[in-house]
Amino acid sequence: MSPASAHADPYVPTHGDPTWRPVHHDLVLDYRVASNRLSGRARVVVEPVTRVRKVTFDLAPRLAVVKVLVDGGRARYAHKGARLTVTLPREIGPGTSAAVEIQWNGNPAPSRGPWGEVGWEELTDGVLVAGQPDGAPTWFPCNDVPGLKASYSFEVTCDSPYAVVTNGELVGRVTRGSRTTWTYEQREPMASYLASLQIGPYATIPLADAPVPQRIHAPARLRAQALHDFGRQPQMVALFTDLFGPYPFGAYDVVVTDDPLEIPLESQGFSTFGANHCHGRRHEERLVAHELAHQWFGNAVGLASWQHIWLNEGFACYAEWLWAPVGGGQSTDAYARRWHRSLSAQPQDLVLADPGAEDMFDDRVYKRGALTLHALRMTLGEEAFGSLVRTWVADHLHGTVTTQDFLDHAESYGGEAVRTLLHSWLLQPTLPRLPTR
């Protein structure tokens, strides 16, 4: 595969420019909650992978570009549809870089596509960003494919009554009159879809100091329920650290919105839940485990392309089953066999390693992915499977992976027998039998 084609993603064919990769995003945002007015400046360090004179960004058409600079000088640009093409002052090639600065403003809104509405969403009182898989361009210009990671800086100015939560470490907060500026640094590389912004009248509630700092950002009315529903999360972090390796970021935060949400969502370094997930009865605890596990699988170890999404969702779903007996539920094996019976009664037409864009969020991807890992665990045994998972994370930390990478890694632990097993689970549509106990 040529470098120029390595970054294209057929599941989101209208996004991404395969000729360059981002090195760093410096985002300066000013947001007015009442009018949903966003003004922004992005400085993106662009590194070409082939010789280029033009570079293209993904940016929603309702955001109006007002100025573009390249290395400090004015540059020509064309913003057509959801694509912003910038003409560089000269052709550049691999081993060089350019700093592209884009200024824009507008009233952001979600994008509508095969997976519903994604991206920037107004809440009753505040904002939520759910970028997976193609919502990042609804609020900032980017090269929006999952296999491209970069570091980020965020400077967000908003009305002072609101809290701002985004990716990385909070390194500054300054209030001037009725406005407050929040500054975050996301030093570990991050895919654009994992960049998120949550704005609301949230109170910050400390949850734990170890094994990493954990906080909840929630409306004051939900404080007691949140402390109960997420009360065992520190135990989950400890369990997953033992099973998967050290937690890969500096802290883990949870945002609970005052609005109900259809599903929770992961972002790098934090997850977001709706008020409907926070009843004070731990009814949604499996989702707490699921979103937490994505910090390892999906965030720290990312996807080269959406085709390989089972590596995110299969591991996160399996983490639910691994937590269940610790939390007082059924055994992991009982969950696996129950879901195997359920999937056996469903259509046998999904290839896990390449489910297609339409089905990449099908529940069968999640459950069959988890069953694949359970079958592998039963085949290898506890000790070898545990070593396989921990070295998988360690070897690919803050990088991106494919299904083939996982096949090669697993084969190093179990040889041809494991490769044969995984081929049947990953590359054939018919659901295999689970290994016997």
Image (cartoon, rainbow, N blue to C red):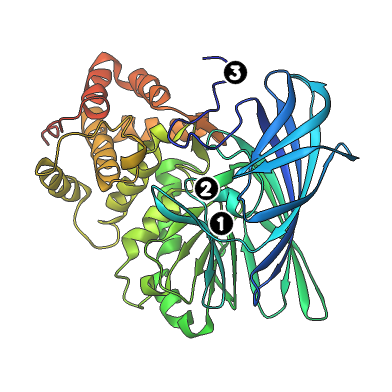
Q: Nearer the viewer, mark 1 or mark 3?
A: 3
- Residue type for callout 1: Val
Q: Residue furthest right?
A: 73
Crowd class of label 3 (few under 14; some 14 to 19; many from 20; radius 10 Å): few
The answer to whether residue 248 of the structure is visible from this angle is no
Q: Which residue is mark 3?
A: 3
- Residue type for callout 2: Tyr
Between the C-alphas of marks 1 and 3, the distance is 38 Å
Instruction: Assign a secondary structure to mark 1.
Output: loop
Between the C-alphas of marks 2 and 1, the distance is 8 Å
Q: Are marks 2 and 1 in contact (CB under 8 Å)?
A: yes
Q: Are marks 1 and 3 in contact (CB under 8 Å)?
A: no
Res 50 label: none
Between the C-alphas of marks 3 and 2, the distance is 32 Å
- Residue type for callout 3: Pro
Q: Which residue is mark 1?
A: 212
Crowd class of label 1 (few under 14; some 14 to 19; many from 20; radius 10 Å): some
Location of residue 283 with respect to 212 vertically, above or below: below
- Work out which quarter of the rendered image holds the C terminus and state it: top left
Q: Which residue is at 65% across, 77% downward? A: 34
Location of residue 185 with respect to 36 vertically, above or below: above
Q: Which residue is mark 2?
A: 247
Location of residue 333 with respect to 253 vertically, above or below: above
